[in-house]
């Protein structure tokens, strides 16, 4: 199916980044966010990303302007009524996502594709919130969406094959690498990352220095960035939620978060976005 108009529910870091990626590929994008202050932050985030792309030679000024022209911000779900694809990119909270999909179901065209950017929650469960599970699947983008090539495409058992195929084709149109992932807790990347992060945090608790842990795993495993720096980049609050959801869904203690991580989150030390987390980043 052709996708000309996309609605993205949630204009945070991920929603804004996905919106930029989609608009660069040509479709019009409605970014839907209930809070006007959040819309202001989203506009600033987009502009910073576009300027960075221009400075790095990834975008021309003309291409950046076309992205601006294709993107609109809304506080109402009404724009969903003209969309071919709806992507939900709100916080990893079941009640929040349930409310989003109830609003979408009342407005979206019958033929629309429905997708969640969830990183951990079961797609089959979220599909049940949508009212049309056969047209629902996961599209898990990675942060920052304009730079990261991977999109995990996660159909559940009831997803129609043509919906899955259309989602894969759309990701390819975006210039991404779509890989099919099973609908299991954490899918592929976060299932593996959760175990690695929890182990690295445990080594830190046992006296290892963050710099040594990260460098050892970068050199020993060929990773470009160690797990603790990755935690700070993603956000320690996001990492804690991911680990807690993995434990909840699998019952496996290997994903258990350390008390040191919980303390940092309680203190508001969330990593790069707050200037301090496992590492210090200054102002």
Image (cartoon, rainbow, N blue to C red):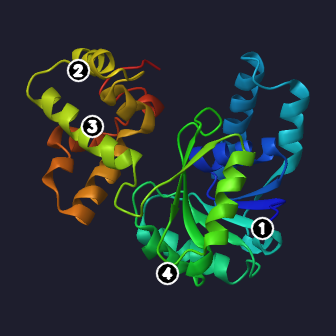
Which circle marks residue 128 in the picture? Answer: 4
Residue 12: in sight, yes or no? no
Residue 271 vertical position relative to residue 96 in the rendered view, above or below: above
- Quickly name the residue at label 3: 197
Question: Which residue is painted at 61% across and 71% down in the image?
Answer: 161
Residue where numbered disc 2 is placed: 213
Label 1 CA crowd tier, 10 Å (few <14, some 14–19, many 20+):
many
In space, the residues marked 4 and 1 are separated at their CA atoms by 20 Å
Compared with residue 76, is residue 128 higher up or lower down, i.e. above or below? below
Q: Residues within 10 Å of mark 3 (few under 14, many from 20)?
A: many
Q: Is residue 160 above or below residue 237?
A: below
- Which numbered disc, 3 or 1, marks the residue that appears first in the sequence? 1
Query: Tag 1 or tag 4, which sits nearer the N-term?
Result: 1
Count of all numbered marks drawn on residues in the image: 4
Q: CA distance from mark 4 to mark 2?
A: 41 Å
Name the mark on residue 236: none
Query: Which residue lies under the disc numbered 1?
Result: 84
**Residue at image coords 31%, 15%:** 219
- Marks 3 and 4: CB-CB under 8 Å? no
Work out how far the residue at label 3 is from the one at label 1, CA to CA, in angstroms: 37 Å
């Amino acid at each position: 199916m052709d996708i000309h108009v996309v609605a993205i529910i949630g204009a945070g870091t991920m929603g804004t980044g996905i919106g930029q990626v989609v608009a660069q590929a040509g479709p019009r994008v409605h970014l839907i966010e209930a809070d006007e202050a959040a819309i202001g932050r989203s506009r600033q985030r987009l502009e910073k990303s576009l300027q960075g792309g221009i400075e790095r030679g990834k975008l021309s000024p003309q291409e950046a302007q076309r992205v601006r022209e294709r993107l609109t911000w809304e506080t109402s779900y009404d724009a969903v009524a003209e969309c071919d694809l709806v992507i939900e990119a709100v916080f990893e909270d079941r009640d929040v996502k349930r409310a989003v999909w109830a609003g979408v179901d009342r407005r979206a065209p019958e033929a629309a594709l429905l997708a969640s950017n969830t990183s951990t929650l079961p797609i089959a469960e979220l599909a049940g919130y949508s009212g049309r599970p056969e047209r629902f699947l996961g599209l898990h983008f990675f942060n920052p969406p304009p730079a990261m090539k991977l999109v995990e495409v996660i159909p559940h058992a009831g997803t129609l094959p043509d919906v899955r195929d259309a989602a894969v084709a759309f990701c390819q149109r975006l210039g991404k690498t779509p890989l099919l992932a099973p609908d299991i807790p954490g899918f592929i990347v976060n299932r593996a990352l959760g175990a690695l992060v929890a182990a690295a945090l445990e080594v830190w608790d046992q006296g290892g220095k963050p710099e040594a842990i990260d460098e050892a795993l970068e050199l020993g495993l060929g990773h470009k960035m160690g797990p603790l720096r990755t935690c700070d980049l993603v956000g320690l609050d996001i990492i804690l939620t991911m680990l807690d959801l993995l434990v909840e869904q699998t019952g496996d203690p290997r994903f258990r978060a350390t008390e040191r991580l919980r303390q940092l989150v309680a203190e508001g030390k969330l990593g790069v976005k707050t200037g301090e987390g496992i590492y210090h980043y200054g102002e």
